[in-house]
Structure formats: C-alpha cells, structure tokens
Amino acid sequence: MIGAVPLSYYLLLSAILFTIGAGGVLIRRNAIIILMCVEMMMNAVNLTFVAFSSYLDSATGQIFVFMIMVVAAVEVAVGLALLVELNRHKEAVNIDEFNSLKG
Amino acid sequence: MELTIFIITAVISVVSALGVIFNKNVVHSAMFLLAHFLTLAVFYFMLNAQFLGMVQILVYAGAIVVLILFVVMLLGEQLGEDIPRWVTPTNGVLVLLALVLLTIVGTAVVEHPTTGAKGDFTPELIQEHGQAEMIGAVLFTDYILSVQLAGILLLVGIVGVIWLARNENLPVIAGDIPTEEV
C-alpha cells in the first residue's frame, strides 16, 4: 500500500501547508483566525511525522503526533479562554488593538 | 490509483487551507478548517496510520473545531472584520516572505535524501497485532514519562482555563451556600 506515493511528496505538501499557515498568521489580524492558522501549522508538522513514521517503519513519529495533539488541544483551549477574557476587557478580537500589557 | 487519491486530497487540503485565511466570515473559516483536518485524516489513513486518523477526526474535527465555533458564537457580532481588499503592498510582502520560507523548506526536502534506519513497526506486525495495541505498548513502555507529562499538561490546562473563564463580577457560588447548623 505504501510506496505508490514518494515520501518527498508528503514532505513537500506539508511544507506547503506549513507555509500557508505561517502566511495566514502574518496576513490576518483576527485572533481566532490566527489560532486556526497555528493549528494548521501544527497539523503540517504532524503530517511530516506520520509520513516519516510509516516510511521508516517506526512508531516514534506516531507517538510524537499523539503528544502534539495533546499540546494542540490544551493550547487551543487556553488560547480561546484568553481570547474571551481579552474580549471582556476590550470589545475586540483584532490583535492590533491589544497593544498594552496593562489590564 | 493511490497517487490520484493523494493529488486530489492534497488539492482539497491546500484549497481549504487557503479558504481559512481568505474568508471574511469566521464561521466559514472554521468550516474550511474542518475540511482541512478531514483531508489530513485521509492522509493518515493512506499512510497506514489508521489509529492516528481516527484520533485526528475525534480531537481536531470533533473537539477543536467545535470549541472554536463555541467561542465564535460567544463573541458574536464583534467578529466581523472589515477587510476592504486583499491585494495590498503589505500582504504582497508577506506572501513573498511565505514563498521564501517555502523555497527554503522545499529545497531542504528535495535536495536531501530522506532515508534512515528502519524500525520494527512494519505493516505485517501491525496486521498481526493491531495498530492501537502496538502504539499502546510503545506508549506505555518507552514513552511512559511523556504520557504522564501529557496528563500533567492537561491538568494544568484545565485549571488555567477555569481560572481564566471565571467571572469576577459574579459572587462565588460556593460561598453563597448557607452552611447548615448541625
């Protein structure tokens, strides 16, 4: 089953997806979209891990992906909670308006 | 055949990733993100990582997108972003920067042979024992420390979110309950 698609295709695809995510973080100013783009970047890295794991017959990559998923879930939960809290202080989600550490 | 499926899924994946960015409606962005996560699950299935594919659907498509949609509904109408046009000098420079990043990463991928020592996680063994069992065996022997750290991380995340989400204006509920005199 594996072998019909070369490994480098998967790596290039995940490079493209990572770049799209990074570009999204730079282009958009909406904090929720930026969180989504960070998730996309993490997923691109996950794809690399899984591709290497299955082409090199190693379980380590899949364990790494598992841990990254845990971190991503916690990150998105804390990030969204921070966003809601920020929204209570200042009626905005545009990150350019959060320009002060003072509450 | 597999290459065809790969190319179709890759195109859907890239288009939905772009759809997340170039969309003025946050809910539509979240839907594109859902499509993106599902295409990644398809890739995991193609790579013989069925367990991770299911976890991907459960955690990302099931939990994270729903969480994002909850927050979108909570914040409501403040989310409308005023984007007059996409083609601006700033965005052009940023896209150029992203392309430079892609060139660097792509060159690294294409120029270097990606080989390494083969492990013992072969498809035949997976057929024999089952994917979840094998990953579980590795997870709870070689990587037990990371499992426990993940547990601590989740606990810290829960406590942090509860602390962040509390409303200071509301009275503390536990303090309001009158203690019964015995």
Image (spheres, coloured by chain):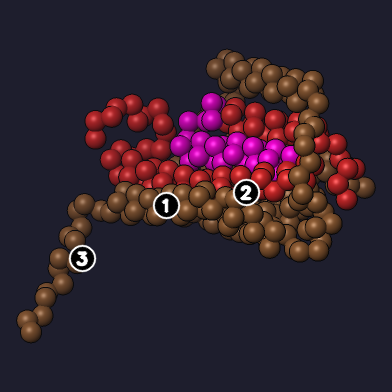
Chain colours: A red, B brown
Q: Amino acid at mark 3?
A: Ile
Residue in the image at 30% along x and 51% along y: B163
The residue carrying mark 2 is: A63
Would you call the spot at circle 2 few (<14 residues within 10 Å), some (14-19), or many (20 or more)? Answer: many
Magenta stretch in the rendered image: A25-52
The residue carrying mark 3 is: B173
Measured from the top left, where is residue B5 in percent x and y? Answer: 85, 47
Q: Is residue B13 visible?
A: no
Specify the subunit that label 2 lies on. A
Q: Residue furthest bottom?
A: B182
Q: Quadrant of the C terminus of chain B?
A: bottom left
The residue carrying mark 1 is: B152
Q: Nearer the viewer, mark 3 or mark 2?
A: 2
Answer above or below: position of B41 versus B101: below
Task: Label 1: state its secondary structure.
Answer: helix
Residue B6 placement, left or right of B153: right
Marks 3 & 2 on one chain: no
Classified by dominant secondary structure, the portion drawn in magenta counts as helix
Q: Amino acid at mark 2?
A: Ile
Measured from the top left, where is residue B124 in percent x and y? Answer: 84, 57
Q: CA distance from mark 1 to mark 2?
A: 17 Å
Measured from the top left, where is residue A55 in percent x and y? Answer: 80, 42
Marks 1 & 2 on one chain: no
Q: Amino acid at mark 1?
A: Ile
Specify the subunit that label 1 lies on. B
Tell me if label 1 and label 3 are in contact, CB under 8 Å.
no
As drawn, the label of residue A37 is none
Task: Label 3: state its secondary structure.
Answer: helix
Measured from the top left, where is residue A59 in percent x and y? Answer: 69, 48
Q: CA distance from mark 1 to mark 3?
A: 27 Å
Residue A29 placement, left or right of B85: left
Specify the subunit that label 3 lies on. B
